[in-house]
Image (cartoon, rainbow, N blue to C red):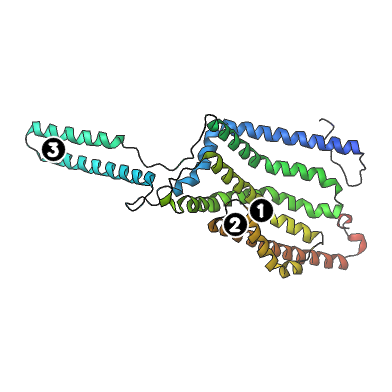
Amino acid sequence: MATALRPIKHEDRLSLVEHLDELRKRLIISVIVFITAFGLCIWQGDVILDIMNRPLEQTAFKNDDKKTKDPFERTAAFQEQLRTTLLADAREYDAIARAENDSTLRRSWEQIAARSRALAATVPPQQARRPVTLGVGEPFTATVRVAAYAALLLSLPLLLFQAYAFVLPAFSRRERKAALPLMAMVPFLFAAGVVFAYFAVLPRAIDFLQNFNDDNFDILLQARDYYKFALSLLMIMGLCFQIPVGILALTRLGIVSVAQLRGGRRYALLAAAVAAMLLPGQDPITMLSLLVPLYLLYEGSILIAALLDRRSARQAARMVDEPDDERDPDED
């Protein structure tokens, strides 16, 4: 490991063994990063599970009126009404006790009010839905699985960097100059995709799916299915937010022009719709929440690529006007 990670230039010629040795070292670093993140996620497992369960808070008791047929929501509504009634009765008993002149009766009314408040305190409050586990080992396996997915989310930017560092020597100087700023965007775009999915897509998807036709079902959400759905959605959305990196790479390397991107808008919209259908959650709310940002990322990539093309054109014009001996050799 000490001699391993020296910078490798484009001009260097490595043997097959040296390439495999470089790959091995990159893989070892990636495994160490993932194991470290996994240990951190296991240590903070309760916090991670709490974060993953928060989107469920917006789906609980949407129909907590008397017309709902969901037994869980009807029970929750009854408990809330019982607590409200007991507290209201306690306030009335306190008012009667204050107005009572007889000390014995006053103490009796105060005792009745105290019993009403004590009974109200024992009524379970409304709580957001939590995933249920089936089987003896599922609490353990679900926690470990969630920690592993969370560790992958945390370490993925560093894993992508290791993959980039391995293939970087294959780039020419011009290609590397175009790739460096693009690769710097990768972790920020990935984090933006995860945050967007967590706050904008996931709650709406769960809200729609969990409350759809719930009068005909006893809604129980299994932990294994919920965490798989939620974490897959977060991870895939983070990867989908890499669209600008791919598009800008193609334009900077001259493979695709901005005019071609503008002419392919209808195909991009179709591709975004197909991708939204293939991603987790085939309900219309989730598909629309995925389709809109995917297409907006495409349009944003066109705007950025056009700006970079104008900048490159201005730089090229300045280079033409400059004498050859004043040019920066790195720009060739």
Q: Are marks 1 and 2 in contact (CB under 8 Å)?
A: yes
| Residue at x 86%, y 42% (from the top left corner) | 8
Marks 3 and 1, how far apart in space? 66 Å
Q: Residue 315: x percent and y percent? A: 81, 64
Q: Residues within 10 Å of mark 1 (few under 14, many from 20)?
A: many
Q: Is residue 232 left or right of residue 251?
A: left
Of the numbered discs in the image, which one, if any, rests on residue 240? 1
**Which residue is denoted by mark 3 in the rendering?**
97
Q: Callout 3, which amino acid?
A: Ala
Marks 2 and 3, how far apart in space? 60 Å
> Which quarter of the figure has residue 326?
bottom right
Element under label 2?
helix
**Of callouts 2 and 3, the N-terminal one:** 3
**Of callouts 1 and 2, the N-terminal one:** 1
Q: Residue 119: x percent and y percent? A: 26, 35
**Which residue is denoted by mark 2 in the rendering?**
290
Q: Residue 291: x percent and y percent? A: 61, 60
* Front one among 253 and 67: 67
Of the numbered discs in the image, which one, if any, rests on residue 270? none
Q: Residue 94: x percent and y percent? A: 17, 39
Q: Callout 2, which amino acid?
A: Leu
| Quarter that holds the C terminus | bottom right
